[in-house]
Image (cartoon, coloured by chain):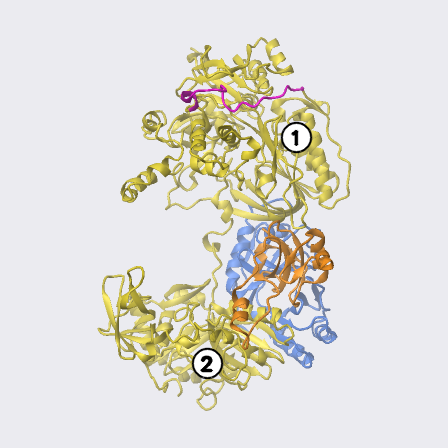
Chain colours: A blue, B orange, C yellow
Amino acid sequence: MSKAVSVLNGARFSGLAEVADAGLVGMITLRGDLESSAVAAAVQSTTGCAIPAVRKTVEASGNSVSWMSPDELLIVTAYDQVADLCAKLQEALTQEHALVVNVSDARSCFTLSGNGAREVLGKVAPVDFAADQFQPGDFRRSRLAQVAGAFWLDQGGAFHIVCFRSVGEYVFNLLKTAADPDAGVGVYS
Amino acid sequence: MLILTCPYCGATAEETELQAGGEAHLKRFGPGSSDEEFHDYLFVRENPKGVHFERWRHTNGCGKWFHAARCTTSLEVFGTYPAQTTEPPQDIQDKISKKRPGWSWREFSCASAKDAS
Amino acid sequence: MLSACERSAHMSTRLAKQGRLIDRSKQIVFTFNGKSMLGHPGDTLASALLANDQMLVGRSFKYHRPRGLVASGAEEPNALVGLGSGTRYEPNQRATTTELFEGLAAQSQNHWPSLEFDIGIVNSKLFSRFLTAGFYYKMFMHPKPFWKHVYEPFIRQSAGLGKAPDKELVDADTYEHFYFFADVVIVGGGVAGLQAAKTAAATGAKVLLMEQNAHWGGRAPVDGGTIDGMEAEAWVTKTLDELRAMENVTLRDRMMGAGVYDHGYLLGYERLSDHMPGKPGPRHRLWRIRTKQIITATGAIERPLSFAGNDVPGVMLAASMRDYVVNWGVTPGKRVVIATNNDDAYRTALILKDAGVEVACVVDARRLGGGALAKQVRDAGIRVEDGRAIAKVAEGKRVTKVAICLQNGDGQSIEEIEADAVAMSGGWSPVVHLWSHCGGKLTWDDTQAHFRPDPNRAPLSHDGLPFVSTAGSASGPMGLGAVLSDAAEAGAKAAEAAGLPAQAPVAAVAEDVEETQMEPVWLMPANADIQHRMKSWLDYQNDVKVSDVQLAAREGFESVEHTKRYTTLGMATDQGKLSNINGLAILADSLGSEIPQVGTTTFRPPYHPISMGAIGGEARGEIFQPLRKTPMYAWNDKNGADWEPVGHWRRPFAYIRNGETQHDAVNREVKNTRENLGLLDASTLGKLIVKGPDAGKFLDLMYTNMMSNLKVGKCRYGLMCSENGFLMDDGVVARIDDDTWLCHTTTGGADRIHAHMEEWLQTEWWDMKVFVANVTEQYAQIAVVGPNARKVLEKLGGMDVSKEALPFMEWRDGEIGGFKARAYRISFSGELSYEIAVSASEGQAFWDALMAAGAEFGVMPYGTECLHILRAEKGFIMIGDETDGTVIPQDLGLHWALSKKKEDYIGKRAHSRSHMADPERWQLVGLETVDGSVLPDGAYAVGQGINANGQKNTIGRVTSTYFSASLNRGIAMGLVKHGRKRMGEVISFPGTDGKTYEAKIVDPVVYDKEGAKQDV
């Protein structure tokens, strides 16, 4: 798939934290009854991940599954695996009222890592990023300054940030501005 | 700036994550309804000084619509609850009765007042 | 050679001793009105000006009276300067809160041509008797025609405080926001704030303590006293060290609590580089804090006394004068008269004397005078006069003479004292602003003659419980011991209210002097005559005097809120920090009422002005607003796109080539698309997937026409109405499989219609089994339009796009040129047309492939204006042009799209309301100008007769109007009364250009009426 490019095409910025375009990321929206054992079984068998608890992300087998709402999951996988995974999920959910849709190209993804990451995100989202309040595995949909966004903290301490593709450039520039090396707040370190 | 707890995702969301949606528990009138019923459904709203039931959407969040019971003067929030209901849950009505004895809103009112009547 | 002190009899100067905050070993050069001056690190601009004998710092707003420093902190009303230059110029900066830095350049304000010699002073000399309360209201009412030519220009010229920055220059600094969460936030880093923080933090609560100045400890290090057996300053240092060592405590200096808002929301305004401009990083940071509890430890502000000439430079608040001495080692004069109604001012006498400044006399308005402190002062050999008052300070640019009288008299002078400075104290008022912002109520304290927070009527949070409390002098008590015990208790209580385990507060123990009760003095002397009252200032910044408030009362202004607006008392940038209590006491007296009955005006945030930059935060330059960009944005930009904002999207209006005007480019695009091949970046159109067993039923309710019976593989144009019946969106719906539909919306409709569908599904029809997903941005969608459309796709190869394999209004999945694609045969132009969706990440590559393959077929990209012209020639409506939220499908002749078979759809019931079925509603028609010109957009057609306002009756309006390159004349659509029955009639549209346009009512479809071109 050499013709496909992400919005920021691998851009990076290093300041208070490392901001990096995550490149092409496979993403699937799954809407269905998250209480249903059929949905749980389908997700488990295709992604290796259990259904996450409310506002949590589960990582396994190189995939992750995040809780978007009571009837929606965000499944993240490798970009070149997404069509295959979509098909498998659809197959597994034939008997269920569920919607599986590839949204890989509808989004921009970034990683934010390093000591200043909590502080940088704390400048753009109205969320408490203190270490005891936002922990690895926590997932949140909120606002990134003027646009909607979602983010989770992985077990390695890096934030994964997702926004709509059309505002990818805005969000990258926003994170870059917030990560100005001379703009440290100094409350989380 | 208000904070409301979304009953779906549990997030304590500030107003910038939310969108206000007006009065809760409206009954829809469609084809076959009288002119008066339809007019009231479209245009007539409660505007209380005190206890009010409202619709809110966690727009910059889980995206779900929910209901909030709130005092319009003190901004006290008595509770939030899912949108898939046609009337305020009893536990929230009871909570309001404790804090605002004698309250009433549309056909709903303070438990003690109901007992008295 | 004479020393500086000996050169002049009247002198403000640097003292040989004192100055705890300055570093005398280093010098700083700065300028004031271009004059070079010297100061020290640690100085404020105010202290440095005093050290340079610059008593005159500005002119007053209305009368241009000479003004000097009155205070030493945020409450300063006079010393406002223009600071910096060029991209860092800012007007109205307070000298008292401006830390001195190398190269600081300040300009005084409100004078012309110079500070020393000002023409505007004639206002004061000649017109002051006319510029009384309500002057503007009275003066500028009549005669009416004078408003535009005389009054308005006059007011505009004299309006505004300071000079606005050059509008062509861009602020050189950056700003940001920061969200922070805490259990307890304490505003104010004086001893009360420190004590409260210590007690709260001991419980383990997450505590944020902020101090607006660069120094901690507040007044205590100046006022003296011992805490836990040590000097106040030592206790401050020790406590700070303890707090810094605690992980649950965050300390921020140079950060002001700007405002308290609902549900524990607090704004902190942090000034990061005002003390060293150009320092890398943001200049201000606005902290958006959410906390369970707020403690305001904001201290108290000293009140001035209202005597004649209380605004002459050199008249200063007593505590501020000792601040200047102790903190910065400067004195505003060599011989000082002190006027007071309380014991605290005696501290100033002792400190001045100790610093070598002569205290000529302490004038104590109380008949029986002061207590222990007064005795100390007398014992030090200073003259003290009880029951006396200042009758008048001689007018001028600085204090020279002070006339003394009986407080109980009318101002008859007993003696005149030579002096070059006056220290005044009218008592202390707690800083209640933050307490009051969100509804905290006040109570009148008779013993201290001030309003203080009423702890029983605190601001309430989301749980209905109090979330703001006060600590220290902000609560009312002024003595050191009482301040500390009040603060310790506040800290413990707040932590407990925030949900932490209760702990008994342990307060530091202080020794302080017992004070004799103050006596309220609202006017000095008590029976001052009008000549004195007219020179007794209440509001320095807005030039409001005792006589103005009294006049307002006589004229019937009884409400304090009305008096405020009528006189402008307390409406300046200092928001009446000094003037409010004195002003309302005068008002109460004039009304024969009590102060608590008159009440206070409303306290509104911010406490102290904050910069616009801080409010805007990071939102400037390229991230001022989120721009939504399609996958082909960069290509479009490189290829001449003239951008048009469509919501937050940017779409090419036209692609302008070298030498072309916008009009040329549009015409070229129209012609080329009609004759050859055009490409449109249609990626912004909304795409919603609707799936589930009930999806068909649901869509039948969403759309006015039937969608459930659409066959898989086919497309149908649909309309959506609001429950009010008004048209809100339109688009082509495609049936993907048995239980899946894809709904196209307008560009602006994607998020709105997605939300609309979710709202009905979540809140009304939650039993329906339907899921909706917004996949708008998953796809790059390109409209391939024109007679050569099929040829280019066939050349790229892949799926069969023939008429037979892919008929009009159908769609197919497949590959085109090696790209996985979905092709819709739909047309918004009347030409042979395909809309091809590929994954957004491949959008640019696919566009490139189309451009390359299309070269031999005359391919050109086209923009939104061409799109509009093409659709208007076909009579297709556009949401937002033909609709405006008041238009129903019937108005537009779209009856065919209103299903009669369906029992219900959103808007159906509304369409049978009487006004909706009214035959008088305006109807969509085509409009053809008689002379071929282009009708002005939005023009109204006029008919017979006039309305109640004497205007011609309107009978229609233009909704879309363009120059059609295909027809070489103007084309338009409009809504016209009885339009469909008036075909061929000519109606007139008066333009705003003075011309009247005659247009014939015609069919809206003016190009290929039969639709032969799109169905080939």
Q: Quadrant of residue C344?
A: top right
The structure residue drawn at horizontal position 44% and vertical position 88%, both measured from the top left corner, is: C802
Kind of residue at badge 2? Ala
Residue C511, x across and y down, in percent:
70, 22
**Image quarter in which the C terminus of chain B is found:** bottom right
Q: State the SS at label 1.
A: helix
Residue span colored magenta: C513-533
Q: Earlier in the sequence, mark 1 or mark 2?
A: 1
Is residue C796 highlighted in magenta?
no
Return the chain for callout 1.
C
Residue at label 1?
C191
On the image, the x and y values in percent for residue C413 come to 45, 12
State the residue in front, C683 or B75.
Answer: B75
- Marks 1 and 2, Cα distance to the nearest angstrom? 74 Å
Q: Left of A174 or right of it: where is C205?
A: right
Which residue is at a point 53% across and 47% down the rendered structure image?
A: C176
Residue visible at 53% across and 70% down? B38
Q: Who is closer to the viewer here, C811 or C548?
A: C548
The answer to whether residue C819 of the structure is visible from this angle is no
Q: Does C2 appear above or below C575?
A: above
The question of residue C527 being in magenta is answered with: yes
- Neighbourhood count class around disc 1 (C-alpha, 10 Å): few under 14, some 14–19, many 20 upward: many
Instruction: Determine whether C582 is above or below C284 in the image.
Output: above
At label 1, the amino acid type is Val
Q: As drawn, is C126 to the left or to the right of B97? A: left
**Depth check, front residue: C324 or C540:** C540
For label 2, the crowd category at 10 Å Cα-Cα, with few meaning under 14, some 14 to 19 and many 20 or more, is some
- Residue A17 vs C510, above or below: the answer is below
Q: Main secondary structure of the magenta part?
A: loop
Residue C974 spot, x, y in % from top left = 34, 72
Q: Is residue C219 above or below residue C470?
A: above
The numbered disc on residue C897 is 2
